[in-house]
Amino acid sequence: MKKDYMTRLEGWARWMLPPQEAEDVIADYRDIVADDELRRGLGKPREVIAPLTTKKAYRVWLAVFAVMAACILIPADSPLPLGLYPVWYTLFSPDGFIIPGVPMFLWFMITGLALSLIWFRPRRGEGKAPLPRSILIVLAVLLAVMGLIWWTFWQITLYPDGALANPVFLLPYGFWWPLADIYVGGNLLSFLLEWSAVPLAVVGMTGLVKARVRDRRWRAVYFLSLSVMMLAFAVLALLTSMTVSAEPLDTWRLCIEITVIGLIGTGVSLC
Amino acid sequence: MLKKDLIELCLLHLLAQGDQYGYDLLRRLHDAFPGTQESAVYALLRGLCREGCSEQYMGQVSGGPARKYYHITDGGLARYGGLLKQWRALAEALAELGIA
């Protein structure tokens, strides 16, 4: 009971208060919660923490969180029934947006990376704790998904005939055809590439929340999820584009850019 | 003088006697203000910190975990003096009305 109360209180403190203040408050409440008489008069954990927040600082945090969340949720909205269906096309439009020639996906990635690096930067005097194993496991899964997308892209662009004869590709183009036909692009591969955005957004948002309430290095999970999503969309754009001038060569450049930014950003986020 | 001011006066009074940690301060005020939530008292204590009336430092305790102590600042002593003056004026006014 005490442990559960304290866990929830720690979560709310780290969510609502600046990092240093949150740690000070948590240290004080460890003793207070241990005293049964005092704990009875405390109220719910959120009600305990809410009066301690500075409204301005909390609103700034919520605004920053909203922008970082938007960077991953807006693209992920694409496949949903009421979603902004052609978001991925806008993301990779050669016309660019904001600055002509600079595709939108770069703005989403740069904004997400810059904000997460600035906001979850190391604090002065912060000790170097060992990297949580759970972060490494999630990153390994995301890297495997990234590798799988690259392998798929490789097969499609370099060996298109072989890809169709490959038993793995028979699945999207053959076995599942009746089911896949109702989805974008008419094949299961496009379906998987597009819908991968939803679980990636869930993982990315989990990383974002955990970067605030657990360990700031969870920001690496947020950023790698965003990068993998963009990579999936880049390949999807090639598969489903109706633009005559669409070239695999452009997609190669896009995929390399996304992967390089994604891996460097993830590495820096782990520091 | 509001109840909030009275609690702040008590907190500053206790801190003026010596550095203390959060739990001790709340424990000592618990009996004096039975109808007040501990979290409200603690919010006032943090408010004093934010306003520069007190500051925190990591203290060393032999045989136990290190705790953060609250220390009254010069600004806190000035605030304490002001609140004490208000309290004495109020107590005198009440005494003149025959309220002991």
Image (cartoon, coloured by chain):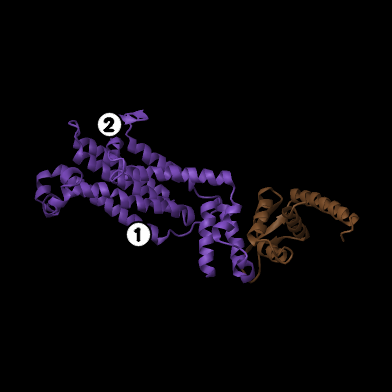
Chain colours: A purple, B brown
- Height in image: A203 above or below B26? above
Expressed as whole percent of the image width and height from the top left, the position of residue A6 reads 54, 64
Residue appearing at x 36%, y 53% in the figure: A203
Is A218 placed left or right of B25 in the picture? left
Name the amino acid, label 2.
Answer: Pro
Amino acid type, mark 1: Ile
Q: Which of marks 2 and 1 is in front?
A: 2
* Residue A124 visible to an observer of this rendering: yes
Chain letter for mark 1: A
Callout 2 secondary element? loop
Residue B65 in sight = no
Q: Is mark 1 on a helix, strand or loop?
A: helix
Q: Where is residue B20 in the image (x, y as percent from the top left)?
A: 71, 62
Quick one: label 2 or label 1, which is nearer the N terminus? Answer: 2
Q: Residue drawn at (42%, 53%), measured in percent from left and top?
A: A218
Q: Nearer the viewer, residue A240 or A234?
A: A240
Q: Mark 1 points at which residue?
A: A137
Q: Mark 2 points at which residue?
A: A94
Rounded to the nearest angstrom, the CA distance separating label 2 from label 1 is 36 Å
Q: In this view, does A16 lie to the left or right of A92?
A: right
